[in-house]
């Protein structure tokens, strides 16, 4: 059984004194359109489904949103809220429980993040460290095409603490920057990483961002297993006050 091997700066960031703070109260929000490729397995008991080969789940787009508040009080953490919803569907032949034959499959993943973080550096090099609590819920619904009353559901859910790190490098006087940010945890056989790299252009209060995001989830809840990877480009637009 694996033990805790990595939590990036999470609890440490909440117990050490920060090295930087915002000069004034600030806030921001953004919405992202993500086009991920989808692969991996979903299992219940002795039944395992490959999301591509067995269920033919289509790669689809995803919507993410986040909001943050930063303040000038150095001993208090800043706050970031994030939400991601992913929906996939497909048709295939399935033999599982009451479903035997042609079936419709619907997969939905939702996650809500609460992140408390400190600004360790805040100039042309920016570095944030903190801790995220992620409320994760994933559900696979398989329905018999010939008899909708025959259906099976696999659901995985839980709340997980994750380390948070974000770094951004600004090109002075241009509005251009590049950055990386992510959450990660590996504990007792479960692991999640959610990482993205991006380029950003800021004009007035508006932020335009293009990047690549990859999320991998290997998480077991009772007899249900979610072992999937999603990765692909995204575009976002936001405001920063």
Image: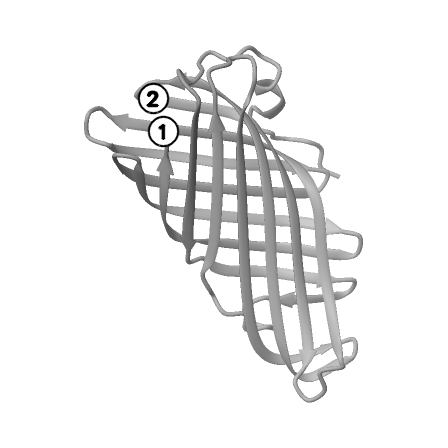
Residue extending farthest bottom: 146
Secondary structure category for the residue under label 2 = strand
Q: Earlier in the sequence, mark 1 or mark 2?
A: 2
**What residue appears at the point 68 percent right and 69 percent down from the top-left corner?**
141
Quadrant hosting residue 79 = top right
Q: Is residue 116 left or right of residue 239?
A: right
Q: Position of residue 85 (x, y in %)?
A: 54, 55
> Disc 1, disc 2: CB below 8 Å?
yes
What residue is pinned by disc 1? 168
Q: Residues within 10 Å of mark 1 (few under 14, many from 20)?
A: many
Q: Position of residue 44 (x, y in %)?
A: 75, 62
Describe the colour scheme in one phrase: one colour
**What residue appears at the point 47 percent right and 65 percent down from the top-left corner?**
59
Quadrant hosting residue 47 = bottom right
Secondary structure category for the residue under label 1 = strand
- Residues under labels 1 and 2: Cα distance? 6 Å
**What residue appears at the point 54 percent right and 46 percent down from the top-left corner?**
83
Q: Which mark is residue 81?
A: none
Q: Residues within 10 Å of mark 2 (few under 14, many from 20)?
A: some
**What residue appears at the point 64 percent right and 37 percent down from the top-left corner?**
186
What residue is pinned by disc 2? 125
Relative depth, front residue between 148 and 154: 148
Residue extending farthest left: 173
Above or below for 240 versus 148: above
Above or below for 127 versus 61: above
Q: Position of residue 139 (x, y in %)?
A: 67, 61
């Amino acid at each position: 059984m694996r033990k805790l091997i990595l939590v990036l700066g999470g609890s440490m960031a909440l117990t050490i004194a920060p090295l930087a703070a915002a000069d004034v109260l600030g806030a921001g929000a953004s919405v992202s359109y993500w086009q991920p490729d989808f692969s991996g397995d979903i299992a219940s008991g002795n039944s395992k489904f490959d999301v591509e080969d067995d269920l033919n789940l289509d790669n689809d787009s995803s919507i993410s949103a986040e909001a943050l508040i930063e303040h000038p009080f150095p001993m208090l953490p800043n706050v970031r809220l994030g939400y991601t919803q992913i929906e996939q569907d497909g048709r295939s032949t399935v033999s599982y429980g009451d479903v035997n034959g042609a079936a419709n499959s619907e997969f939905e993943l939702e996650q809500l993040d609460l992140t408390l973080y400190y600004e360790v550096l805040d100039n042309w090099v920016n570095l944030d460290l903190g801790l995220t609590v992620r409320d994760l819920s994933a559900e696979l619904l398989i329905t018999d095409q010939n008899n909708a009353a025959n259906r099976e559901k696999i659901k995985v859910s839980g709340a997980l603490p994750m380390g948070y790190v974000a770094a951004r490098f600004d090109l002075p006087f241009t509005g251009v920057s590049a950055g990386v940010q992510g959450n990660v945890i590996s504990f007792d056989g479960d692991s999640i990483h959610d990482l993205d790299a991006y380029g950003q252009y800021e004009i007035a209060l508006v932020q335009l961002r293009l990047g690549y995001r990859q999320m991998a989830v290997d998480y077991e809840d009772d007899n249900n297993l979610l072992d999937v990877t999603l990765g692909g480009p995204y575009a976002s637009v936001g405001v920063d006050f």
